[in-house]
Image (cartoon, coloured by chain):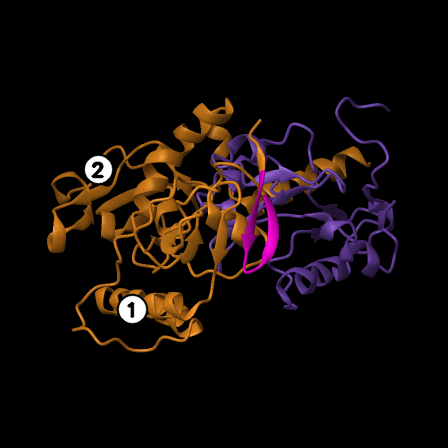
Chain colours: A purple, B orange
Amino acid sequence: MKVEGLNTNIKLLNVYPYRCTACRNCEIACSFRHIKNGMPSPSRINAISDEQKRQGKNIIVVCMQCDKAACVKACPVNALQRNESTGAIVHIESRCIGCGSCVQACPFGNMKWDFVSSRPVKCDLCGGDPMCAKFCPEKALVYE
Amino acid sequence: MSKIVEITVNGMKIKAKEGEFLLGILLTKGFEVPHLCYHEAVTPYASCRLCLVEVNRGNGFRIATSCNHPVMDGMEVRLDTPEILEERRNVFEVLLAQAPDSQKLRLYAKKWGVEGTFLRVQEGDCILCGLCERVCREVIGVSAITFAGRGANKILSTPYDDQNPSCIGCGSCARVCPTESIKVIDTGLVREIPKIHSKHELVPCRICGRGTLTKQHAQWLAKRTNFPETDFYICEKCKTKETAKVYARVIQ
């Protein structure tokens, strides 16, 4: 499908939810990559296990790098900008004033708030080499 | 489209847009210059005086603040000369005397090799850099806080030292503060910013009941994004769970 303004040659982080076992390796890989810490709570990706334990009902929630993103619209200082080579919306720390508007504006809950640095955090596709996809043992996350 | 010019920094040639400010270029090129009152998102104010560099515009080197110095063609810049180090040390000592209670400032000064001060130490943790005031006025656009008084009596305050009804309680002033002088204290559903006499109620998340954001901030955000105001009264964790529920329905 051709979407106007979108580079179709870029890779996408694809999620195959029926393969996911909610092992949460992706969360830990994400935390290690971004804050050098094994805590899953500040990770940019969330693997949510199905409470009713039905097969193939585990869900991975990760930033979809929307075309018309609510976070970008909400940011008053243009601190969220699209990286042309990866297609990801990247949070630029030096421009951010920490008002928290993007966190409330994202309708999917993919903008997270880091209570340590008082700044929002979001998936930036690790600059073109997403660690979550690398460490997913079930290939539920594939960067292709 | 502004003209691309070439400047020399410590003997290195660097290309930059004419009229841009020097400190922003130095930082993006990876040079280390101390700065407290500078932020990319607001106009420079040059009040902390830490970003001093030596600039030669054809009439000899002189010391200038780089954060509000526009780039000109053929400009020469020197960063770590003995004069600069001496001046920077003095500025750090003045700041440390002005705001000795700020842990963050002390650590920052230590990083640049300055500990202790030769001046009489005062009380307080604010260096009056005005970053909070500029963010509130230029970015948020509500001008809830400003400076009051002159000279030694200058303080950051609100009108009549009372709660300003135009404050939206977003907390940006606290999060840009380079000395952590302004603090946001969230207890339950009440957000207090004691330094600017602000007290707001946080709207509870419609699912878990935890505090999300203030009503005024939601109204400000609704005006900006054209989303209904009630869209924002949900915390990010509950939003993630709601998204997961929708996905689970879709892949059934």
Disc 2 target residue: B164
Q: Nearer the viewer, residue B159 or B239?
A: B159
Q: What residue type is labelled 2?
A: Asn
Disc 1 target residue: B90
Q: Which chain carries label 1?
A: B
Q: Which of A96 and B183 is in front in this view?
A: A96
- Give the CA separation, mark 1 to mark 2: 37 Å
Callout 2: helix, strand or loop? loop
How many C-alpha atoms fall within 10 Å of the one at disc 1: few (<14), some, or many (≥20)?
Answer: some
Q: Do labels 1 and 2 share a chain?
A: yes
Residue B157: % across, % down? 19, 46
For residue B244, say whether it is visible: yes
**Quadrant of the image occupied by residue B102:** bottom left
Residue B127: % across, % down? 27, 58
Task: Say the numbered circle drawn on residue B40.
Answer: none
The magenta region covers B5-15
Q: Is residue B9 magenta?
A: yes
Q: Which of B184 and B99 is in front in this view?
A: B99
- Does the magenta stretch mainly form a helix, a strand or a loop? strand
Q: What residue type is labelled 1?
A: Asn
Q: Does the magenta stretch include residue A11?
A: no
